[in-house]
Image: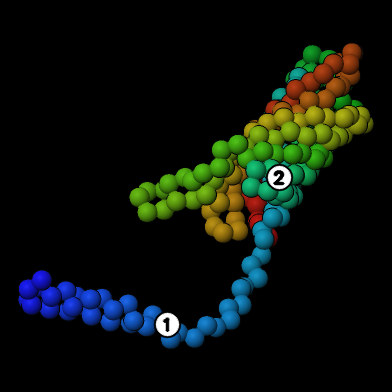
Amino acid sequence: MTPLPRLLCCALLTAAAAHAADPVIEPEVARRDVRLPRLPSKDFDAGLFVGTYATQNFGSAPVVGLRVGYHLSEDFFVQGSYGRSSVSDEAFRQVLPGGVFPNQKETLAYANLSLGWNLLPGEVFIGRGLAKASTLYLIGGIGSTHFVQQRRQTFTLGFGGRLLLRDRVAVTLDLRDHLFSLDLLGKRQSTQNLEATLGFALHF
């Protein structure tokens, strides 16, 4: 080997050895303990609702009530509801003397416990730069309805939507069917009573 290539090889070997011997750069940033904040879980929610309740054979009337829920997971939640409406038999009094009810207006009250399933969680976009968390859900449950001195077991089925306006405040829109039996018109029959409501809930 001629002297020039031999010198180049020696120089390359020397440079490689020097590079391999360079120490690993150690970070000089001192570790510090980080205390994680205790954020509320916001698994519970409670709120009020208003809407309309259509009692089969007796027309529609306003309904008000409250709901309390607990979110078991991102997919399922349980909810307790209580509502009141004032039902009139005015249409029957135009045909039947004395009407159907003891009084022209009677209070209908119900309470139930339901299980909900968040079917389509996602976001609603308001304009270009604002997005709000939302979900569509199915719900069903069992409870009791008190109406004209009768207390009947009630099944509820329905669906709804929830939109989080803020971190803790949500607005809900629900459509539910209350199924129970009555014997006010001479025979006992199953009735379907539709309810549409708008509600506000606080998560905590």
Q: Residues within 10 Å of mark 2 (few under 14, many from 20)?
A: some
Q: Amino acid at mark 1?
A: Pro
At x 76% / y 19%, what residue is drawn?
Answer: 57
**Foreground: disc 2 or disc 1:** 1
Q: Give the labeled residue for mark 1.
A: 27
Q: Quadrant of the C terminus?
A: bottom right
Q: Amino acid at mark 2?
A: Phe
Q: Is residue 11 above or below residue 92?
A: below
**Which structural element holds mark 1?**
loop
Q: Give the labeled residue for mark 2.
A: 77
Q: Nearer the viewer, residue 166 or 151?
A: 166
Q: How many numbered discs?
A: 2
At x 18% / y 78%, what residue is drawn?
Answer: 10
Q: Quadrant of residue 27?
A: bottom left
Q: Is residue 203 above or below residue 4?
A: above
37 on left or right of 143:
left
Can see residue 144?
yes
